Structures are given as structure tokens and as C-alpha cells.
Amino acid sequence: MGREYDLSQSEYLAQEIESTPHIRSRRITVRDIGALVHKRKLMPATIADRFELPEAAVHEALVCYHLNHEYFAELDVSRRRSNEAAITPDDISIEEPVDASELDVDC
């Protein structure tokens, strides 16, 4: 990350899920908190209430988000590219119909 927010000194943040900073013992990422505030226009107190978090955890996540804005912007671009490259059901074409009885699957 850019200015390196020191997660080792954090009471509320950790970096275990996909190497992305998140609220300790929760699956709510710093990126999610930033998006809820900046894109959805939610107040930190509202986020804390909805996710049953200490409001201080939400504020700490926002500090981390702002200090590392470039990192999170790059992460968004990277994830968008991964999603664009992913195979979807529309990408798969079946040349001929498959009879389910031919598949060795117990139903």
C-alpha cells in the first residue's frame, strides 16, 4: 500500500482475507467501508450500526482507505479485469445435447 497504514498497531483492522485490509474477525473490508461512505453516502455511525461494529472501527477503516487510496483504486481495476476475463455460462456452447443418463452422476 502507498503510505502503509500500520495494521500491526491496529485495534480493529487486520489483513488476512485475500491480503486485503478488513475489520478484524469480520469479512468487511476497508474497501467495502470506503465504498459505503463514498458511493452509497452512508454515515460512519450508520455503517457501525448496520454491521454491529464499533464506530471507531469504521473511522479507522476510513483512515486506512484514505491513506491508501491509490492501492484501493488499483485493487478495483484489478478485480474489474479479473471479472471481465472470467468465463460465464454464456461463454460455453454445447455442440450437441447431452443425455443426463450418460453422465456418471447420482441424483
Image (cartoon, rainbow, N blue to C red):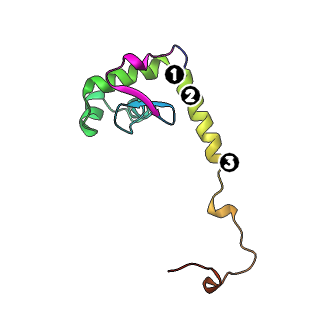
Is 53 drawn above or below residue 93 in the view shown? above
Q: Quadrant of residue 103?
A: bottom right
Residue 82 in the image, given as x and y percentages of width and height? 63, 43
Q: CA distance from mark 1 to mark 3?
A: 25 Å
Q: Magenta segment, which residues?
A: 4-16
Is 72 drawn above or below residue 2 in the view shown? below
Q: Residue at x 42, y 20 (%)?
A: 7
Q: Residues within 10 Å of mark 2 (few under 14, many from 20)?
A: few
Q: Quadrant of residue 66?
A: top left
Residue 18 in the image, given as x and y percentages of width and height? 51, 36
Q: Residue at x 36, y 19 (%)?
A: 10
Q: Are marks 1 and 2 in contact (CB under 8 Å)?
A: yes
Label number found at residue 39: none
Which element type, helix, strand or loop, lies under badge 1?
A: helix
In terms of sequence position, does the residue under pointer 3 or pointer 2 come before the other? 2
In terms of sequence position, does the residue under pointer 1 or pointer 3 come before the other? 1
Q: CA distance from mark 3 to mark 2?
A: 19 Å
